Amino acid sequence: MNPIRRPFRYRYNNMALYVIGINVLVYALQRIFPRLTNYTALNPVCVLNGWVWQFVTYMFSHGGWSHLLFNMLALFIFGTQLERRMGSGEFLLYYMVTGILAGAFSFVVYWFTGAYGVFLLGASGAIFAVQLAYAAYFPNAVVYLWGILPLRAPVMALGFTALELISSFFGFGSGVAHLTHLAGFAFGWIYFLVRFGANPWRYLTGRY
C-alpha cells in the first residue's frame, strides 16, 4: 500500500473540541498580553527572520471575539461531525496540513506583492477546508444559513468559496484574507486527491 494513503487506526477523542479550546485559550492570552499577537500572527518579515512557528500559530490567533466566535462555531458544527467520519487522527492531520499550507501560500503571495506589513491570523483557511470535507462526506446534509435559509452542504461550501473568489477580485471586505480562505479550500481538495485518491467533485455530486 502507498504509505501516503495508509489509513490511521480509527479513534475518536473529541479532537475538534480540543482545537476549539486551544483557540479560545490563545485568544484569552492575546487579550491579557496584547503583544503576543505579534509573535503568533503570520508576518512575512518575521518568518524570514526565523519565526517559522507562525505558520502554525497564526491558525490559533484571532483579531477579535466575533472573528473567533464565527470560526469556532463553524468548527464545532462541521468539525465535530467530520471528525466522527474521518477519525481523530485523520481529522487533525487534515486540519493542520490545510491550515499550514494555506498560511504558506499566503506568505508567498504577501512577500512577492510587497505586503510585508501584513499580520495574518485566524483559523479560516483550515475552516474552509473543513467545510469542503464536510460537504464531500455529507452531500445530502442541509445547513441553515443564518438559521433560516436551507442549503445543501455542497451548495454551501461551493457558494461560500465562489463568494470568496469574487471578493478577492473586487476587493470586497478589506482586511479579510480571501486568498487564505481560497487556499484552504484548494489544499483541502488536493488533500483528498493525494491522501485518499478521490476527487471531491464526485463526493459533492453524490457520484462516489
Image (cartoon, helix red, strand yellow):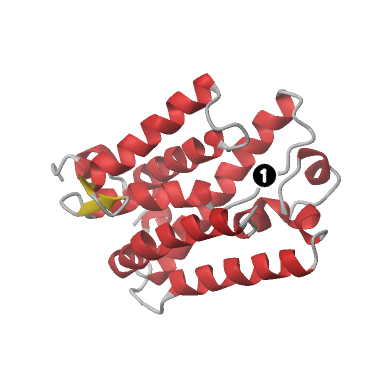
The quarter holding residue 16 reads bottom left
Q: Residue at x 33, y 74 (%)?
A: 10
The quarter holding residue 49 reads top right
Residue furthest to the top = 170
Q: Is residue 70 left or right of residue 11?
A: right
- Callout 1, which amino acid? Leu
Q: Is residue 200 left or right of residue 59?
A: left
Report which residue position mark 1 lands on.
120
Q: Which element carries disc 1, helix, strand or loop? A: loop
Q: Position of residue 142 (x, y in %)?
A: 19, 52
Q: Residue at x 63, y 36 (%)?
A: 175
The quarter holding residue 154 reads top left
Q: Nearer the viewer, residue 151 or 130?
A: 151
Residue furthest to the right = 49
Residue furthest to the bottom = 13
Q: Nearer the viewer, residue 76 or 99?
A: 76
Q: Nearer the viewer, residue 63 or 148?
A: 148
Count the marks: 1
**Quarter in which the N terminus is drawn:** bottom left
Q: Position of residue 149 (x, y in %)?
A: 23, 46
Q: Is residue 185 left or right of residue 62?
A: left
Q: Residue at x 45, y 52 (%)?
A: 127
Up/down of 110 relative to 61, above or below: above
Q: Is residue 155 left or right of residue 75?
A: left
Q: Nearer the viewer, residue 200 or 134?
A: 134
Residue 146 can be seen, yes or no: yes
Q: Position of residue 57 (x, y in %)?
A: 67, 58
Q: Position of residue 133 (x, y in %)?
A: 33, 51
Q: Mark 1, residues whose alpha carbon is within 10 Å: few (<14), some, or many (≥20)?
A: many
Residue 98 can be seen, yes or no: no
